[in-house]
Each structure stands twice: as C-alpha cells, then as structure tokens.
Amino acid sequence: MVNANEWLDKKIPADEREKATTLCIYHQNCSYRSSQDKRYYTYPTNEEQNNSQSAPHYSFYNVILEGKLDLNNFVNLNELRIEGDDQYKDKDRRQKLTSLKIDKCTKLAKITINYTTLGYLSLGSKPNLQSANFTSNKWLNFCDNLLKNQVGKLTSLILAKDDSDLKLEVKRVNKESLEYQLDVTKSNLDRSNQLWLESLVDSQKEILNNSSAYAHKQLERCKTILSEVLTAEEIQDLLRKIIEITELETRLNKASLKD
C-alpha cells in the first residue's frame, strides 16, 4: 500500500501528465469485466504491462493506493479506471483512497471507480462524459452535493415570499436533489439494500400522508437494516428531504385552493 500522490509523482512526472489520455490503476495483475452478472478477467502479457506505462496510455497493475489522489493536471484524460477487488469479500483488497480530484479533467468520457474506500469525489463539468461506473464504493459522497447547503439557505429565503411560482420551482429543485441523492446512495448498495432504501422512502411518504402504525413500524425496520450500510446522518438527511418536499407540496396545494 502506497501514498497515492507520492506514487503518482514517481510513476508519471508532472510535465508528462497533460499527454495522458488513459489512466488505469488495478489492484491485481489483471482487469475484470462483467457480462450478465458474471465476472471475467483479462490478463496482460509482461510486454503489454511494460508498454502501458508511458503516454498517452497508462495502465498499472498490482497497486493499492491510499489517501488523496489529485489528477487535476491530467487535463486531456479521456478514460479513467481505478479498481480494487472484493472477489473474496476481503476489504483489504479495496483501493484505500479517501478523495479523488478530477474536476478539471473536463475531457473525461469514461470513468470507472470500483471497490474503493473513496470518501469524496467532485465530478465538476464533464460535457463529454459517456459512461460512468461506480460499484461497491461504500463511503462515496459526491462533493458536488455540498451545494445542497446553499440551496437550503436559498429555499428558506424564497419560502418567506408569497410567490407560488417560486415555491413550485423550489419544489422541483428539491425533488431533483433528492432523486440525485438516492441514485448516488443506491450506486453504493447491493440489490437487497437498494430495495430497503426504496421501502424507507415509501414508508416516510406513507407516514406523512396517513401516519399509519404499519408505516411507522416499517420505517424503523428499514432504518435498522440500513444502519449496517449507511450512517445515521445519511438516513436522516434523506428523510428530511422527503419531509421538506411533502410539506412544500401541501402548502402549494392549500395556496392553490385559496386562489
């Protein structure tokens, strides 16, 4: 295991990085692909490994990185792959990254980040992005979501005004934010926990609409199960967003009836 930025400095000099168009970093001496939920491996020859460590295409094998990785000076990067492995459910096989900076890699068309402990990721503007794959990154949060705090402050200011159009727009923005948040959260869960997350959302909506005893019981069950894979703060943040949207919807409906 090596410090990510120190490893990068040794492998690719700073003045060579703008030439790179492909960067692939693998935990083992092969890369894997999925086909109909089956995993198969591609093993490069020794010659291929040696020839893939120079511009414009870089591929590195048998590497475990830890800490922060800054790729912002790879300004012409087209494809990025960083992959750990949990084939044997061994967390030590994951890439131990805590953050990844790629917001200035505006030419990225393909990105794959699989089996890491990555905590924060800022995508920034990616007008050419064609495919994105984020699998089994348990703690992954998109830094772009930090903007939600600013949206929250603006929401409070706007709601103080008696303007239905503005409130309707706030509702739309909040719903899009919730959907995005759910998509990001789901991308880091297996299918079973994705279903529990959907049940959590449905239960909270049911409580707000009817406040049934069953919905309350189901909500607590969902929270207990999801607490194994999500923090209490993550769960509460999702529930808070649902409550905000529902309350705003109710206020808009009442205002519409008065008109």
Image (cartoon, grey):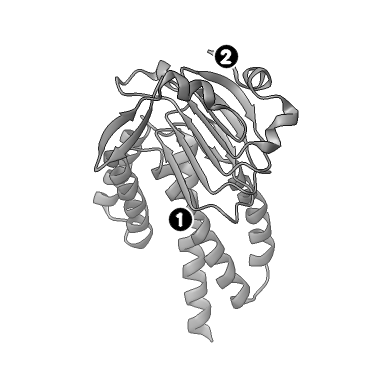
Q: Secondary structure at mark 2?
A: strand
The residue wearing badge 2 is: 2
- Vertical relation: 258 (above or below) 234: below
| 85 in relation to 173, above or below | above
Secondary structure under tag 1 reads helix
**What's the residue at 49%, 61% (across, down)?**
175
Estimate the x, y position of residue 103 in percent, counting from the top left: 65, 43
Q: Residue at x 64, y 76 (%)?
A: 163
Note whether 88 is above or below 39 in the view shown. Answer: above
Residue 3: x %, y % from top left: 61, 16
Q: Which residue is mark 1?
A: 179
Q: Position of residue 123 (x, y in %)?
A: 59, 45
Residue at 52%, 55% in the rendered image: 177
- Give the class, few, some or many, for how many residues have Cα within 10 Å of label 1's Cα (few <14, many ≥20): few
Neighbor class of circle 2 (other Cα within 10 Å; few <14, some 14-19, many 20+) is few
Q: Nearer the viewer, mark 2 or mark 1?
A: 2
Q: Which mark is residue 13?
A: none
Quadrant position of the C terminus in the picture = bottom right
Residue depicted at x 53% and y 27% = 52
* 239 and 99: which is toward the camera: 99
